Amino acid sequence: MLKKQLHRFYRSDGFSMTELLVVMGIMALMAVISLPYIVNYRKLYRSEDQALKVIDLMQETSQLAMTRRRTFRFEISQTDNAALIIDENGTAPDVLVKRVPLDQVSEVRMDTNPSGISRPNPPDYANAVFANDSTGHLRGTTTVVGHTVWAARFRSDGSVVNAANNPLSATIFVWPPAAPGSSTARNRGEVRAITVFGGSGAIKYWKHNGTNFVGG
């Protein structure tokens, strides 16, 4: 009798191989069904993810400038397809602090507004301008110069200026092209924008609702 009771106890305390295989089969089926939804979700929100990543880096640059009491430069490099934080330490050369890769340009563009979409208005600030970087910076022991970048210099007083120390107010757009190299967005609802207010150093995030930009 005791042997039979122990046998029942051990049988009820675990799972048979058949039960485990059934559970694993259900989990595998659920993974196969959900995978396309996950991929589509990632694709739909890729421009938003990148815009928020860039805003975080801008805010980090601003915080470094204010806490360390010197100018730090934020760059978006089209040559490297990366966002950079650079320490303008007062003595040449400037030093790279952080480099974050961006999504491929065929998937997400970061430059001017796509065709048919106007800038957020107000403030209707000019588009960010990419130009040759003649200042350069030190990456490890290598001097990097001559890349095509958009640069915003965050100062210790909270303002954002250009190379000539004039207040820099600009808007940069983040959007998925309809096809690689296209000037048209794949979907207007996926277009995002970031406005930098030079005098105050404020950063504004915008989402396009298919008709116009609204604050994010």
Image (tube, rainbow, N blue to C red):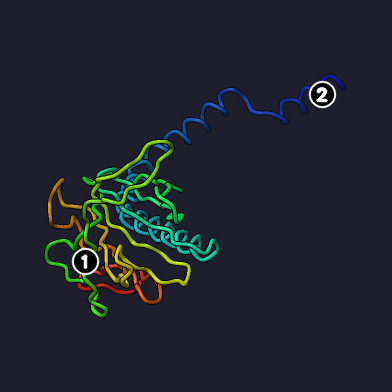
Counting residues from the start of the chain, the first of labels 2 and 1 encountered is 2
Residue at the limit of the structure toward the top, as seen here = 3
- Left or right, residue 60 beside residue 106: right
Residue at the limit of the structure toward the right, as seen here = 2
Dot label at residue 127: 1
* In the image, residue 124 above or below residue 173: below
- Tell me the quadrant of the picture where the N terminus can be found: top right
Residue at the image point whose x is 35% and y is 50% from the top: 83
Q: Report the amino acid beneath label 1.
A: Asn
Residue at the limit of the structure toward the bottom, as seen here = 122
Disc 2: CA contacts within 10 A as few (<14), some (14-19) or many (>=20):
few
Which of label 2 and label 1 is nearer to you? 1
Residue at the image point whose x is 18% and y is 52% from the top: 177
Q: Tell me which corner region of the image, top left, top right, bottom left or bottom right, holds residue 125.
A: bottom left
SS under mark 1: loop
Residue at the image point whose x is 34% and y is 58% from the top: 51
Instruction: Pick the residue in front: 176 or 23.
Output: 176
- Tell me the quadrant of the picture where the C terminus can be found: bottom left
Dot label at residue 207: none
- Left or right, residue 26 beside residue 165: right
Residue 116, given in percent of the width and then of the height, sits at 12, 66
SS under mark 2: helix
* In the image, residue 81 above or below residue 165: above
- Left or right, residue 8 beside residue 92: right
Q: Report the amino acid beneath label 2.
A: Leu
Residue 52, given in percent of the width and then of the height, sits at 39, 59
Residue 91, given in percent of the width and then of the height, sits at 44, 52
Pointer 2 residue: 6
Q: CA distance from mark 2 to mark 1?
A: 77 Å
Q: Tell me which corner region of the image, top left, top right, bottom left or bottom right, holds residue 215.
A: bottom left
